[in-house]
Amino acid sequence: MEEIISVTHLKMQKVLEVLKDDLSTLRTGRAAPSLVENIVISAYGGTQRLKVVELAHVSSSGSQTLQIAPYDGSIIGEINKGIMEANIGLTPSIDGQVIRISIPLLSQERREELTHLVGQKLEGAKIQIRQVRHEAMNDIKRQHEDKKIGEDEVSSLEKEIQKETDYLMEQIEDFGNKKKEELLQV
């Protein structure tokens, strides 16, 4: 019956990882490599589709500037074009062998919009966690009805799954609070 616990744990952790990745793409007004690292670029004349992080070193030079240094200088134009086409509200410019992106400061209104968006993303993750819990509880009930597990095991498994659910709900809240704090800092 540890299988139910481990499968449930893995599914819930996956939801948490997706939320973390999703929150990292929200722009806080600070230069963070995660803003552009996962943009997919058509490189080498469109023969390959690769992420920026696979094509270049991305770093922040100061709190308002991103610097992208391509591993292969011949594709600097394609990376620049791909970032523009990604339509993420950032304007790259080629400066010699690197691409620089100035990150504009966020307005208070935009900060509030993003804070609201964080709340929506958190709620979506919580719904997914509850769905995983619901599926696990159904599996436990089904196994009990099939006489594969006894009443004591049902109770023990349900408590373990609820404990994991509660823990992950706290984690989601923590991630959300940290992101909201970042967004509201000027």
Image: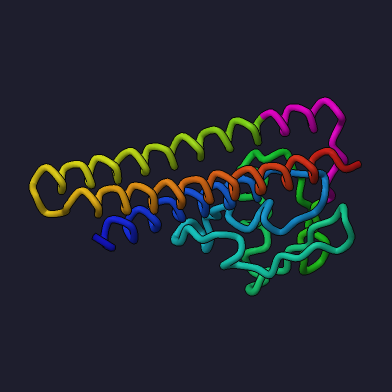
Q: Is residue 115 magenta?
A: yes
Residue drawn at x 25%, y 49% is: 154
Front residue of 89 and 71: 89
The colour scheme of the drawn protein is: rainbow
**165 shown above or below 4:** above
**Which stretch appears magenta?**
102-116
Q: How many marks?
A: 0
**53 shown above or below 145:** below
Front residue of 153 and 70: 153
Q: Which percent across, then down, holds residue 162?
A: 42, 46
Relative horizontal placement of residue 118, taking residue 132 as reference (left or right): right
Q: Which percent across, then down, holds residue 153?
A: 25, 54
Report the quarter where the C terminus lies: top right
Residue drawn at x 73%, y 47% is: 178
Residue drawn at x 84%, y 56% is: 65
Q: From this viewpoint, which residue is outermost toward the left?
A: 146
Q: From this viewpoint, which residue is outermost toward the front?
A: 152
Relative horizontal placement of residue 53, taking residue 13 as reference (left or right): right
Q: From this viewpoint, which residue is outermost toward the bottom?
A: 71
Q: Which percent across, then down, holds residue 40?
A: 54, 53
Front residue of 63 and 68: 63
- Judged by its main secondary structure, the magenta piece is helix
Q: Which percent across, then down, holds residue 163?
A: 46, 50
Residue drawn at x 46%, y 52% is: 164
